[in-house]
Amino acid sequence: MIDWDIVKSIDPLFKYHKPAACEISSTLPVKFSAEGKKLHNYTIYGSSAVVNGETKGVGDKTANLFDISSIIKSDNYVRNDNGEETYSQASGYLLNKISVSPSTVYTISGFSSSNNGTGVYRIYMYDSNMQWIRRTEQFTASANNSYTFTADANAYYISIQYTIDEFSPETIQLIQGSSAPAVYEHYGYKIPVTISGKNLFNASGTYNVNASIGVNDGVFPFSTGGNRYTVFFSVKPDTSYTFSCSAPGDRLCIVEYNSVIDPQNYSLQNTLSPDRTILLSSNGAQSYTFSTSSNAKSAAIYYSNETSPADIQIEEDIQSTSYEQYIEPVTVNIYLDSPLMQSQYISYLSKKRFPDETSVVLPPVHTLSGTNVLSVGTTVQPSGIVIKGKLREL
């Protein structure tokens, strides 16, 4: 719990919004209201679960295979054609062995930009017993600041040689595949935190299409054109949602699918049947609440025929609430060196993991409006999120 008097004495220039309950704990997703304020602090509590026979915590492995701590030599050392360490007058860095898969494509990116991509590199390959195989020819950073290569058929480990003065290891990425993310991703584990609005209905979204669902069987598309509109959206299993609008249309059909659906893949000649029909009505409705099944991954709502409804809202709730415009979700990552297990937690304010007090890499705060939803999308969900002294006025 924040001591407000201490906060004000330390930072008298800021005014803190103190809600009726200045500590909120909830199962995911966490909902909170904000009008032009910044999310100032939250705490994520770890959890443990057995997945495929292995105990896992909150946090999924990042794509970056390059561990900064793998730098083992940084004073003019290179490896010769036989894999032996030798001294070179050219400044260089020698990186420890990284596990790879044979005959697999990898991309290394993030070379030093201060030298305009002129750094010299080599890839060293080793077999399953970490015995030397060969080294690649020297290469330099290309125009897009990356280099793609294929591991040898018997290569299970690689090492990287970098020979240039300006070396920025915190920018290097080693990614399985033919391209690397444009935005740097840390080595280790990440917890993606998504902040979105309560309204899931995006009128201009890709999955809001000019077609109808059949009121007799739920097949999509039954017809196209006119005031026929169907919105597809992802859902969670065993969860309640409410559709609402200020003025109902002429139709309302709600169906469910056991997979994520892209409506662009279907036409009058290639139709889609639902895995479950929830509501098939020739009449509109101003509000309708429904619950998804245990296998549900997406749903579709056909909400008009001749008269289009206004102020449409789809929200995760058991009843309709006041209308708010759709807010594009923002996902940011918390990076940590290992998953967040049971009895551990991350404090955004402290920028640490407890109880061991190790540092974590946290995203910036965000300016919010309306009713916001805070969620975490990892294989193992956290046991809870607590928002303390949650908002700071601008």
Image (spheres, rainbow, N blue to C red):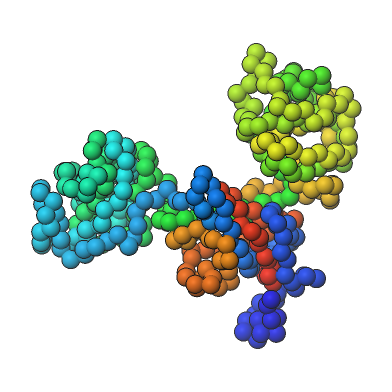
Residue furthest out toward the top: 269
**Relative to 23, residue 87 above or below:** above
**Total number of numbered discs in the rendering:** 0
Residue 217 lies in what quarter of the image?
Answer: top right
> Which residue is at a point 15% across and 63% down the rendered structure image?
76
- The location of residue 213, given as percent across then percent down, is 76, 23
Quadrant of the snapshot with the C terminus: bottom right
- The location of residue 45, given as percent across then percent down, is 61, 63
User: Considering depth in this image, is 223 or 31 the residue closer to the camera?
Assistant: 31
- The location of residue 154, given as percent across then percent down, is 23, 38
Left or right, residue 165 beside residue 89: right
**Relative to 64, residue 251 above or below:** above
Left or right, residue 206 beside residue 123: right
Residue 341 lies in what quarter of the image?
Answer: bottom right
> Which residue is at a point 36% across and 60% down the rendered structure image?
170
State whether residue 70 appears in this view.
Answer: yes
Quadrant of the snapshot with the N terminus: bottom right
> Which residue is at a point 76% across and 23% down the rendered structure image?
218
Left or right, residue 199 beside residue 352: right
> Which residue is at a point 75% across and 60% down the rendered structure image?
33
Residue furthest out toward the front: 53
**Relative to 230, residue 193 above or below:** below
State whether residue 116 appears in this view.
Answer: no
